[in-house]
Image (cartoon, rainbow, N blue to C red):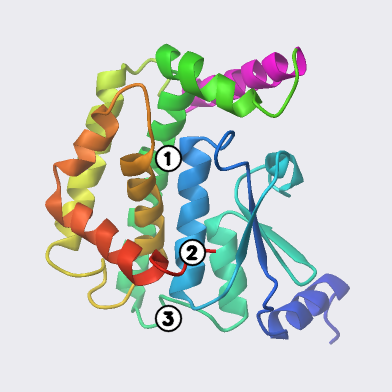
């Protein structure tokens, strides 16, 4: 029985070796990118470095609109374009590169549960603070998001993005939360991560998985990003093992290796 053309082409793409000119796209780093996109981009960079897969980071004004899913970041590998950490993990796995192949089924299920926790709590908190906290939206998010564009397009795009995020927050039950409740959610997430990590170097003992890349991307970005309040970073700083974890990954995979 012959394979459908799409599946056949996917198999061919998976069989091709990882190229030296693989590219990761994200918004402009200095002037445009926001906390949540920066965290997601760093998580993918950390994952690829943990896999030993080279990637060049390219900043583009319209990266969000270039992405097949409308989400940041995305990678261009050969003739394939893949966005977001989950699909990128599956893509590299098809090419024979996996960080979690040594885990058993129970550990793999646990890893996925913690990744969902990070996305449901940390990523959502970042989006909330960016667009639902009036001070942050006014002073940071709208100016940065709209910086590459001239008025009135800049204003239209920023308010459109804010409306989209606020609609999402209402849909998932976050619209009525206070800033303090969001900070408390972040604390609870960090407490769960801290307890799972314990004294281990990584969440599953001695070797990193995609969970480590995801957690590092979000925690490190929160710790190093200027916001209107330092409270979000302060919640993370309460957990010394998470701080050590971030420093360990930075030293191992990023220092003296920056693209």
Q: Main secondary structure of the magenta part?
A: helix
Closer to the chain start, of discs 3 and 2, is 3
Residue sitting at x 19%, y 59%: 244
Report which residue position mark 2 lands on: 258
Residue 221 to residue 5: above or below: above
Q: Quadrant of the C terminus?
A: bottom right
Residue sitting at x 36%, y 65%: 109
Residue 175 to residue 3: above or below: above
Residue 196 is marked as none
Q: Quadrant of the N terminus?
A: bottom right
Foreground of the two, 60 or 168: 60
Mark 3, mark 2: which one is toward the viewer? 2
The magenta-colored residue range is 152-172
Closer to the chain start, of discs 3 and 1, is 3
Report which residue position mark 3 lands on: 101
Residue 123 is marked as 1
How many angstroms separate mark 1 from mark 2 (CA)? 24 Å
Closer to the chain start, of discs 1 and 2, is 1
């Amino acid at each position: 029985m012959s394979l459908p053309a799409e599946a056949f082409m996917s198999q061919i793409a998976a069989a091709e070796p990882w190229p030296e000119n693989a590219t990761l796209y994200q918004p402009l780093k200095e002037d445009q990118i926001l906390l949540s996109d920066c965290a997601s981009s760093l998580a993918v960079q950390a994952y690829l470095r943990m896999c030993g897969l080279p990637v060049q980071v390219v900043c583009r004004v319209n990266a969000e609109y270039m992405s097949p899913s409308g989400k940041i970041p995305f990678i261009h590998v050969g003739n394939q374009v893949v966005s977001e950490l989950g699909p990128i993990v599956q893509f590299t796995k098809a090419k024979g590169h996996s960080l979690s192949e040594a885990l058993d089924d129970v550990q793999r299920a646990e890893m996925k549960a913690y990744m969902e926790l990070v996305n449901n709590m940390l990523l959502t908190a970042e989006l909330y603070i960016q667009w639902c906290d009036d001070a942050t939206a006014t002073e940071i998010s709208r100016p940065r998001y709209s910086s590459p564009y001239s008025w009135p397009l800049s204003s239209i795009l920023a308010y459109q993005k804010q409306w989209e995020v606020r609609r999402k927050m209402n849909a998932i039950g976050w619209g009525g939360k206070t800033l303090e409740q969001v900070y408390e959610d972040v604390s609870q997430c960090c407490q769960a991560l801290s307890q799972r990590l314990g004294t281990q170097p990584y969440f599953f003992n001695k070797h990193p998985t995609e969970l480590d890349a995801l957690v590092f991307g979000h925690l490190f970005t929160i710790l190093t990003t200027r916001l209107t309040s330092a409270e979000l970073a302060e919640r993370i700083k309460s957990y010394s093992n998470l701080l050590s974890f971030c420093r360990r990954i930075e030293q191992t995979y990023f220092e003296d290796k920056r693209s």
